[in-house]
Structure formats: C-alpha cells, structure tokens
Amino acid sequence: MFPNKEYLKFIESSRQKGLDIVGTSVIETLGSTYAKPGNMILVNSHGEFTGVLGSPSLHNKIFALSKELLESKESLYFENTPEDKESGHGVSRYLVQPFFYNDNYGPLGISVDNAGKTLSRSIKDFSFEIVDDTIETKLENEIFYQTIEKPYSLLVFGSGAHVTSLLSMANVMGWETTIIDMKMSEAYVNKADKLIKLENIKDILSMDLSAYNASVILSHSPKTDDTYLEALLHSNVEYIGILGNKKNMEKKREQFNLYDDNRFFAPVGLDIGGITQQSIALSICAQIEAKKNGKI
C-alpha cells in the first residue's frame, strides 16, 4: 500500500496542514495496463498529489472526482476503458474514497501503523477491517484486499562523495535510506533519511540489520568491509552489494564461502558500461530493483 516513502511523507504533510485526502486505488485490471492492483494516487484538498496511475485524461478525471467526493463525502467505484480499442491497453477498475483529517484519515491513517498486514475495504460502503495476515492484493466478493507494505529500505555503509549520487537515485525510487559510517561526512549524505555514526567498528556486529531490505558497502576499506559483510551475513537482508574490483571480490567469495549465496553481488551493480558516479548509482539501483522484483 505504501511501496515508497513519498506516500507516507504526503500523508504526514497533509496532516500537518490539516487537509483532507482522497485516495484512488487500482482494484482490478483486465489486459495490459499501466498501473496494477494496489497502485494508488493520493490527492489532498489543496490539489497536491503523489502517485501516477496512467494517462493525462485519467489523471484529470481522478482530480475532478477527488474534488467532488470531498464535498459529497461518498466513495466511488468506476471503470476506465480505453477509447481506442486498437491501443493495446486494457481495462482498469478503481475505488475512490475520501479520508478526512478530523477522522485521522480513517482506514488510510490506521494503515500507516499496520505494515505487514492487510487492509480490507468494501467497494459498496465505508466498512473496512485490518487483517493480521498478509493477503494478496485482490478484489473478491466486492471486498478489496490491499497489502500494507512499508517502503523499501536501503542501508549504505560509507559517506564519501561517491555516495551522493546513489542517495539521489534511491530517493527518486522512494526508498528509505540509512547511512552508517565511522567518520560521517554529512555534507555528502544529508539527503539520507537517517544517519548512524559508529563509535567502534565492532558495534555493527551487535546491531539488528534485518529491518533493511538491501545494503551496499561503499566504505573503500577492505578491513572495514569485512566487518560490515560479517554483520550483514548474519541478518535477513535480501541484497548485499560491495563496490570493488573483480579480483578482490572473488577473494571475498572464497573468504566468506559465498559462491552459493544469492544475496551477494560483487562487484555491485549491473554492467551498463558507465564510469561516472551517476551511472554507477544507476547500475546499483537497477540491480537492487531487479532483485526486489525477482528478475535476478
């Protein structure tokens, strides 16, 4: 439900301004569509928004409906069918529902604190339920089940100038970003969501890193890298990448017996042929996204 941090930031920003929000969720699709079930756009009563579901005409329709529903205080179910049958686009069905500031945003507000569970909403009225189990996002018997995700999280070891582009790219993806380092160069990583300065390198071995989805070691220090890698290998982090040359990375595989570990990516990033810090950041984020989506 909150696949990136921009949704949570938008809700909090609207809350601070005392604004109401209308959420439009894709609840079902037939054929090829831009957005899939669970994708969502939020529009507040100032006309600010986050999320994109499709064409400019659909976007404008959602804006108009959002304004109407804030006044009528009703929910709406509608279907969008492409005018050009030869376009190759399919049919999408949507649930549009207002969430009011004075009600703490109802099911939307409650969902913020229930990551890992499922929001169950009727498409006929305002009834809803938080289900403790994770249920596949789907429409069934006029009930829309929407998995409550938390934003994907990236942990980066190192805070040098070479990290700035990676942070920028990760922020574009809407990932939550955390930087860990012994000597924090804050000027290069001030766009991160969280900074953690270690007093002792061994402190990392007692930290619980399993809350993070992906990690990248960019410390440029072989001994430090080994300690970070040891900590990560004892966690549930699903992607572990290290920047370095192929020869040294082969030694890492042998040293830590990582030949069959499908979490380990070294040298980190897809080979896209670039040499700038921006292209390296792109290659790393592309590889992480591919791993996240089960493509590698």
Image: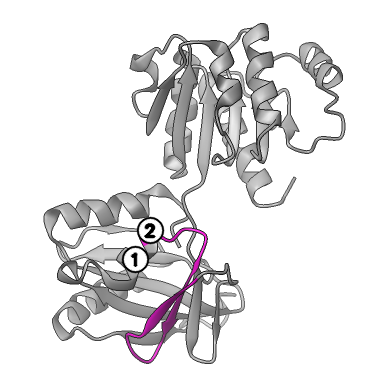
Q: Is residue 85 left or right of residue 53?
A: right
Quarter holding the N terminus is bottom left
Label 2's element?
A: loop
Q: In the picture provided, is 89 more to the left or to the right than 175?
A: right
- Residue type, numbered disc 2: Asp
- Whether the magenta-drawn stretch holds residue 122 is answered as yes
Q: Which residue is mark 1?
A: 110
Confirm whether residue 205 shows in the render: yes
C-beta proximity under 8 Å, tags 2 and 1 = yes
**Residue 88 locus on image (x, y percent):** 59, 75
Q: Residue at x 62, y 39 (%)?
A: 288
Tag of residue 252: none
Q: Secondary structure at mark 1?
A: helix
User: The C terminus is located in which quarter?
Assistant: top right
Q: Is residue 120 above or below residue 77?
A: above
- Which residues are the magenta region? 112-131
Residue 109 is inside the magenta segment: no
Residue 164 occupies which quadrant of the picture?
top left
In the image, taking residue 288 as reference, residue 67 lies left or right, namely: left
Q: Position of residue 245 (x, y in %)?
A: 73, 13
At label 1, the amino acid type is Ile
In the drawing, does residue 265 fall left or right of residue 100? right
Query: What's the residue at 34%, 78% (across, down)?
Result: 96
Give the image quarter of residue 215.
top right
Dividing the picture into quadrants, the one containing residue 75 is: bottom left
Question: Closest to the observer: 106 or 276?
Answer: 106
Q: Residue at x 34, y 72 (%)?
A: 107
Residue 113 tag number: 2
* Residue 289 location (% of width, % of height): 61, 44
Alpha carbon distance from label 2 to label 1 = 6 Å
Instruction: Report the residue at 47% width, 43% height from top.
Output: 173
